[in-house]
Image (spheres, grey):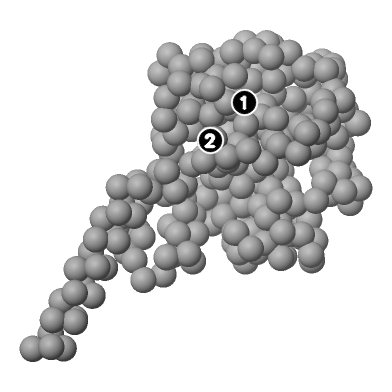
Amino acid sequence: MYILSIVGLLVLIYLIITLILYNSQRSLLYHPSENNYSGDMLTVSIDKIKIKNEDNIELLAWYHEKDIENYKTILFLHGNAGSLENRIHKINHFNDMDVNFLIISWRGFSGNKGQPTEKGLYKDAKSGVEWLKNKGIRKENIIIYGESLGTGVATEIAQNNNFAGVILESPFTSMVAAGKSKYPIFPIKLLLKDKYESDKKIQNIKSPILIMHGEDDKIVPFWMGKKLYELANQPKYSYFPKYDDHMMEFNKDLIKSIDSFIQSLN
């Protein structure tokens, strides 16, 4: 009886934790209020704009136009935490490249209304594409750039499309696989609402693709980025530095990889 009681208690605890994980999963996945802003100052000129998505939510975005006639335009889709300011150290480097860029903030992030969900973020990203098209920028001149969680969004909107190129920084194969790596004893596939199954979509991307992933990534295992690279169609390029963590170091080697990729698209 004593052993049965212990087993019953453990099962009850397991079920309670499972229920907590299910109910709190989106607060575990999305962290709009997290602030890793290190005080970097913008060295590139931007226009702060609002882009309305199909759910009638206005999204804060930053736009930099250098030359839309002759240069490609990056649509930057950020990760699951923080504001646009957290990406200043990245977009500053775009100023040294022959490229325009638009970086949008997700619903629920950077003061935007709404709550982030997988379907919602897909709509947000597509609204960025539509805004660029309304500026006269064709899809063939847009590079979709996803960072971390944003790689799941980038893969979704890039499939079966004719974008100039796709860049995935610190990508994951699917949120199911990422969840299993952190919570291996729970039925993640059954619990997850937002699955972001990039491994099932990446072969639908026909645009040239650059995948960047640090081998020392402690948040998203490196094997996931490598697996996506193996699944991707040609032409494909990789940048896999040995000692980079999840927040990749924007050093001269990484910047050169991005710049070389962009130049290859011309």
Which of 163/19 is in front? 19
At 64% across and 12% down in the image, what residue appears?
49
Point out the image quarter for the C terminus.
top right
> Would residue 191 appear left or right of 155 to someone viewing this image?
left
- Label 2 crowd bin: few (<14), some (14–19), many (20+), radius 10 Å: many
Which one is in front in this view, the residue at disc 1 or the one at disc 2?
A: 2
Disc 1 marks a residue whose amino acid type is Ile
Q: Type of residue at label 2?
A: Pro
Residue at mark 2: 32
Give the number of the disc on residue 104.
Answer: 1
Tell me what residue is drawn at x 59 percent, y 19 percent. Answer: 60
Q: Label 1: few (<14), some or many (≥20) within 10 Å? A: many
Left or right, residue 74 beside residue 178: right
Question: Which of the image's four quarters has the N terminus?
Answer: bottom left
State the image coordinates of residue 129 (x, y, percent, origin top left).
60, 23
- Seen at 72% across and 65% down, the residue is 215
* SS at mark 2 in the image: loop
